[in-house]
Image (cartoon, helix red, strand yellow):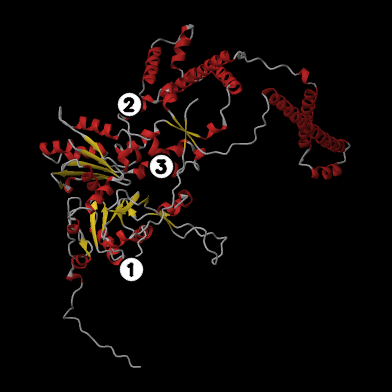
């Protein structure tokens, strides 16, 4: 019995409101927020694990039109994070504060912050009296940081804020040294960040606008196109589950695809995913003999119904025939007036039309009488010709051997037919070997003279050049029909649950391959390996060796099985002969950014790297105190005021005072 994987359909559990004890309330404990575009992780710096982990989404469910305004809503007007129990029901009402990996919708960010502070139990009056460490995207625009600082300082009254890059926090948490090539595989983007001796080289960093979101959507489209009858059952939540648990990166993508062309390899390695379905209760529990008897009874009833309809149709036709013969008698008696009056009720314009209708109606009556007679005497009907099909053996083991042999013969005949069709298609194209051979034979026959066709061997030559001779042979066509009927009758029917299964073959490796080949989904950017090679070229040989010996993988998409091995293979191809390289994966690619920010918040120099409220008012919202894991601060240039666009005045213009006399 083949293994069938069952979808778990994970449901979120609403977050509880945590206790806000005296230690937190009066201890000035920093709050650490890893504000990721897929998940948000929040916790206190004195604890080992985050208190809240939820998807960075909000939903506004539609109002139930059947409910009156005075009635309290069954669901809250806004659902955030883990409060969204059934995410598929509100899929089209979901909103996020991110545009790619940068926060741009701060009205949504404010609602997320309300969710965070309320579930942490913070009940202080009018403010959040805790310094905050918040992660941000690499090279975040100053304008976005300004709005975030404005929200935190003026909306929540926090005393201090420090910003840092999630991938750098993760790097320092894993303690891999001060030089590394960081590959941060996120939900919307992939960042390649070179760090040389503790300094981030932002000028030579690269970003690929592709991540887990695009991979999920691509896999969703692949499976919906493959199984159009299960479009509604293939939801985004189930696609995420398949992506997280069954997808991987191929070491050699082209070689892996060639393996799947082998039917035996397919049967041995395909993953069968069972979709939810409702078991049909229509099964009657009848034996095979009872089912045959039931079919015979239904066929007999159908024959009786058809015979009754034929008799009714014959009676109608005979009645109409009598009327037409009566009209014919009128014209034979020479009574033209009555004849013209009688044909008004029929579609008859002349005597010739009358004769034609009588002839057609007579033929139809005779045909119906023959059918009725044949149905009344079934023993006189000749038996259909035997197809020559060998009956299957009754022994179970021999039956299985016969069934396997029949399937093999069916595939063989089907393969011959497909080969003939492929050859015929090749004949139609000019620059193919089949077309070239055909033209060579034709040119040879042109020089043979006019006696072509007098010999039996000429027929073989004709078949080799004739397009019509390449059509399906009648013998193969009959054999194919015979095998199809045998398989349809004797092959055991699939259980109903097999009609609700997804067979995953190349899809689990095809979707993650987007990281290396974005062109598969129409993205014109370079893939991960090409971008890494491009970054290496901007450094000296010594610095290239430093980076290649410490390639650091972090982010949610770095958890794909096989990604480390694929990158090692790509580095082996792009690096010089006999040079060394090493790929390191973060201990916890999804949580190491929060762990690193937590350690940063617990360090002795943390207060020196925070922006206080006074500095915010003095330096502006975009101000950033730089540290080892932060972006570099570049002050925004002052706006340019062009005085030529607004001249002060013109001496030649005469000013007049208008007085309105009321």
Task: Give yes or no for contact between labels 3 and 1 (Cβ–Cβ under 8 Å).
Answer: no
Image side of residue 424 versus residue 51, left or right: right
Q: Is residue 467 in view?
A: no
Residue 509 visible from this viewpoint: yes
- The residue that disc 3 covers is 240
Between 183 and 471, the one lying in front of the other is 183
- Residue farthest along the bottom direction in this orientation: 662
Q: CA distance from mark 2 to mark 3?
A: 26 Å
Image point (45%, 44%), residue name: 10
Q: CA distance from mark 2 to mark 1?
A: 62 Å
The secondary element bearing badge 2 is classed as helix
Q: Earlier in the sequence, mark 2 or mark 3?
A: 3
Tag 1 residue: 126
**Dot 3 surroundings within 10 Å: few (below 14), some, or many (20 or more)?**
some
| Sequence-earlier tag: 3 or 1 | 1
Disc 2 or 1, which lies upstream in sequence?
A: 1
Q: Which residue is mark 2?
A: 255
Nearer the observer: mark 2 or 3; the answer is 3
Query: Looking at the image, is mark 3 or mark 1 nearer the viewer?
Result: 1
């Amino acid at each position: 019995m083949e293994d069938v994987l069952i979808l778990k359909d994970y449901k979120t559990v609403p977050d509880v409101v945590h206790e806000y004890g005296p230690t937190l309330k009066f201890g000035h404990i920093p709050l650490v927020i890893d504000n990721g575009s897929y998940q948000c992780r929040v916790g206190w710096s004195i604890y080992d694990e985050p208190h809240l982990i939820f998807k960075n989404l909000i939903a506004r469910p539609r109002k139930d039109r059947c409910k009156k305004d005075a009635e309290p809503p069954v669901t809250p007007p806004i659902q955030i994070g883990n409060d969204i129990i059934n995410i598929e029901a509100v899929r089209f009402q979901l909103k996020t504060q991110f545009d790619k990996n940068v926060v741009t919708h701060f009205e949504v960010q404010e609602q997320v912050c309300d969710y965070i502070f309320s579930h942490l139990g913070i009940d202080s009056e009018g403010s959040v009296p805790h310094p905050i460490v918040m992660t941000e995207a690499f090279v975040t625009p100053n304008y976005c940081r300004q709005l975030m600082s404005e929200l935190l300082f003026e909306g929540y009254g926090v005393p201090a804020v420090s910003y840092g890059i999630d991938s750098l926090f993760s790097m320092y948490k894993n303690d891999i040294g001060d030089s590394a090539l960081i590959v941060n595989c996120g939900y919307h983007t992939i960042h390649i960040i070179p760090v040389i001796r503790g300094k981030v080289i932002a000028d030579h960093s690269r970003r690929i606008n592709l991540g887990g979101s695009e991979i999920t959507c691509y896999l969703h489209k692949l499976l919906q196109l493959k199984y159009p009858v299960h479009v509604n059952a293939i939801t985004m939540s189930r696609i995420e589950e398949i992506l997280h648990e069954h997808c991987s990166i191929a070491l050699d993508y082209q070689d892996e695809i060639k393996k799947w062309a082998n039917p035996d390899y397919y049967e041995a390695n395909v993953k069968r995913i069972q979709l939810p379905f409702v078991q049909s209760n229509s099964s009657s529990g009848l034996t095979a003999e009872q089912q045959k008897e039931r079919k015979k009874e239904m066929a007999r009833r159908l024959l009786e119904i058809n015979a009754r309809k034929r008799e009714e149709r014959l009676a109608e036709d005979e009645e109409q025939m009598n009327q037409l013969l009566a009209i014919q008698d009128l014209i034979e008696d020479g009574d033209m007036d009555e004849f013209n009056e009688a044909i008004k009720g029929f579609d008859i314009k002349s005597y010739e039309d009358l004769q034609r209708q009588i002839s057609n109606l007579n033929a139809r009556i005779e045909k119906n009488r023959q059918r009725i007679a044949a149905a009344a005497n079934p023993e006189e009907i000749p038996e259909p010709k035997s197809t020559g099909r060998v009956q299957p053996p009754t022994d179970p083991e021999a039956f299985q051997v016969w069934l396997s042999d029949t399937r093999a013969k069916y595939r063989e005949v089907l393969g011959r037919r497909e080969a003939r069709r492929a050859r015929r298609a090749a004949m139609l194209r000019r620059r193919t070997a089949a077309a070239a051979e055909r033209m060579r034979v034709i040119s040879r026959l042109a020089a043979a003279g006019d006696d072509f066709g007098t010999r039996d061997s000429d027929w073989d030559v004709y078949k080799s050049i004739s397009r019509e001779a390449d059509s399906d042979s009648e013998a193969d066509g009959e054999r194919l029909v015979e095998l199809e009927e045998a398989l349809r009758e004797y092959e055991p029917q699939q259980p109903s649950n097999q009609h609700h299964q997804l067979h995953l073959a190349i899809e689990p490796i095809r979707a993650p391959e987007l990281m290396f080949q974005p062109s598969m989904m129409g993205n014109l950017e370079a893939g991960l390996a090409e971008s890494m090679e491009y970054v290496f070229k901007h450094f000296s040989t010594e610095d290239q060796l430093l980076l290649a010996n410490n390639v650091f993988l972090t982010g949610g998409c770095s958890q794909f099985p096989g990604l480390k091995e694929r990158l090692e293979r790509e580095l082996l191809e792009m690096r010089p002969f006999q040079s060394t390289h090493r790929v390191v994966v973060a201990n916890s690619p999804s949580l190491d950014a929060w762990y690193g920010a937590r350690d940063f918040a617990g360090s002795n120099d943390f207060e020196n790297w925070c922006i206080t409220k006074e500095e915010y008012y003095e330096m502006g919202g975009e101000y950033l105190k730089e540290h080892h894991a932060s972006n570099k601060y570049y002050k925004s240039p002052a706006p340019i005021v062009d005085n030529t666009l607004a001249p002060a005045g013109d001496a030649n213009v005469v000013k007049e005072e208008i007085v309105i006399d009321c």
